[in-house]
């Protein structure tokens, strides 16, 4: 059973990201403030849900949340500042857009770059512990999936409609055969053989 909040008396936003381990595409993050009495039997870590369940829950979250927002950091920015910092920046960008200002942030993971003037708590596997983080994980994942499906139409060879940019055999084989796209993260080990950068 997921917990509704850490601090009952504070306006809390849960934050999570999607796409950190991908070879291609932006990293997405979401921030969600849920009502204190929010209940949903299905809501769980997005990785535990089917695609259909995630999209159904996205509608519920967007309708019932006090505030929600999605932040994005591009592949170019990821290469410039590294993926860990990019993940935190995506969360900051999501918090920036919230229409209600939170008094506390619940962050999925064990590290975070402090957001100006808002205290935070990091929670390892938080998307399986707190409703607001689980809600953020669903928004981040579904919005990123939509984005990767759009990129797939532009570059169909990389199987992004299935792998969403993650390092599958098919994805890496397509990189080896056809080279990279403008959406690939050039600082990542794209071929999985110890090569850090590719020069096509």
Image (cartoon, grey):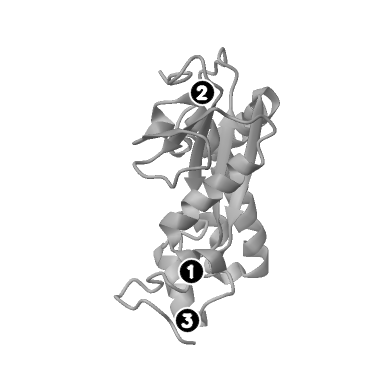
Name the side, left or right, on which 125 lies relative to 119: left
Dividing the picture into quadrants, the one containing residue 172 is bottom left
Q: Check the image and report above or below for 160 versus 15.
A: below
Q: Are marks 1 and 2 in contact (CB under 8 Å)?
A: no
Where is mark 1, residue-wise?
79
Residue receiving disc 2: 42
Disc tally is: 3
Which numbered disc, 2 or 3, marks the residue that appears first in the sequence? 2
Q: Which mark is residue 177?
A: 3
Residue 84 appears in view = yes
Identify the residue shown where x is 45% and y is 43%: 114
Q: Marks 1 and 2, Cα distance to the nearest angstrom? A: 36 Å
Viewer-proximal residue among 182 and 168:
182
Mark earlier in primary sequence (1, 2): 2
Residue 146: x, y in percent? Answer: 64, 50
Front residue (pair 95, 162): 95
Which of these two is toward me, 133 or 105? Answer: 105
Name the residue: 60% across, 43% down. Answer: 94
Q: Earlier in the sequence, mark 3 or mark 1?
A: 1
Whether residue 21 is visible, yes or no, is no
């Amino acid at each position: 059973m997921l917990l509704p909040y850490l601090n009952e008396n504070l306006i809390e936003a849960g934050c999570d990201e999607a796409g950190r381990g991908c070879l291609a595409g932006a990293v997405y993050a979401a921030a969600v403030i849920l009502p204190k009495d929010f209940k949903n039997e299905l809501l769980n870590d997005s990785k535990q849900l089917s695609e259909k369940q995630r999209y159904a829950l996205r509608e519920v979250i967007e309708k019932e949340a006090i505030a929600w927002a999605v932040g994005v950091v591009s592949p170019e920015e990821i290469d410039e500042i590294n993926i860990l910092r990019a993940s935190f920046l995506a969360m900051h960008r999501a918090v920036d857009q919230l229409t209600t200002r939170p008094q506390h942030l619940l962050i999925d993971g064990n590290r975070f770059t402090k957001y100006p003037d808002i205290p935070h708590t990091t929670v390892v596997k938080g998307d399986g512990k707190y409703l607001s983080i689980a809600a953020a994980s669903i928004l981040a994942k579904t919005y990123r999936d939509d984005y990767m499906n759009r990129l797939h139409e532009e570059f169909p060879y990389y199987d992004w409609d299935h792998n969403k940019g993650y390092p599958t055999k098919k994805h890496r084989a397509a990189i080896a055969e056809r080279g990279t796209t403008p959406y690939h993260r050039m600082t990542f080990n794209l071929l999985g053989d110890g090569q850090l950068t590719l020069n096509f």
